[in-house]
Amino acid sequence: MEYRIDDKMLNASVFLTFVKQVWPGDYDIEKTKNALDKTLNITAYDGKKLVGCLRILSDGYFFGTITELLILPEYQKQGIGSRLLQLAKENTPTMLYFGSQPGIEAFYEKNGCQKSLQSYMIEKK
């Protein structure tokens, strides 16, 4: 497995092909490119295949958040997500805040993350 920190080679097309295998949907490629440009992208590749990605959005001083941690289903439970999370901890300029999908909390706790504030969302209609 090859891990890349601040993966500048990650392009929107490759990312969307990957994301649709985890979160099926209809995504805009230009908006995806802009989103990737604004985050620190830590990736995992099996050969040339993108199999995992963790993105960090940060102001560099006060606040940072993990926008998502995604692993292809067939690569889950192999330590890739744990390694990406460790690399995030080592390479973030700030404390990181993030939410968890229901049922995944044990993964984060196993990896040394502490439960913090309750998260809320404002959905844009």
Image (cartoon, grey):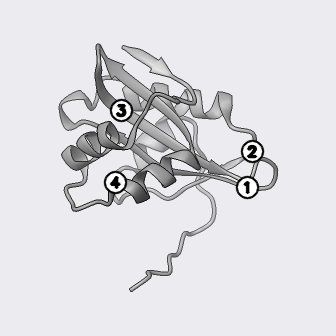
Q: Which of marks 1 and 3 is nearer the N terminus?
A: 3
Kindly identify which residue carries mark 4. 29
CA distance separating discs 1 and 2: 6 Å
Q: What residue do we see at 59% from left, 34% from top?
A: 88
Q: Name the residue under label 3.
A: 52
Look at the image and tell me in which quarter the C terminus lies.
bottom left
- The residue pinned by badge 1 equals 63
- Disc 4 is placed on an element classified as helix
> How far from the left and from the top, in percent, is residue 75?
24, 28
Distance from Cα at disc 3 to Cα at disc 4: 19 Å
Q: What residue type is labelled 2?
A: Thr
Please report whichever mark, 2 or 4, sits nearer to the chain's N-terminal start: 4
Q: Which of these two is toward me, 117 or 123? A: 123
Q: Distance between the residues labelled 2 and 3?
A: 22 Å
Packing grade of label 1 (10 A; few <14, some 14-19, many >=20) is few
Q: Do the residues labelled 1 and 3 touch (CB within 8 Å)?
A: no
Q: How far apart are marks 1 and 3 (CA)?
A: 24 Å
Type of residue at label 4? Ile
Position of 9 with respect to 27 (left or right) is: right
Q: Mark 2 points at which residue?
A: 94
Is residue 34 placed above or below 108 in the rendered structure? below
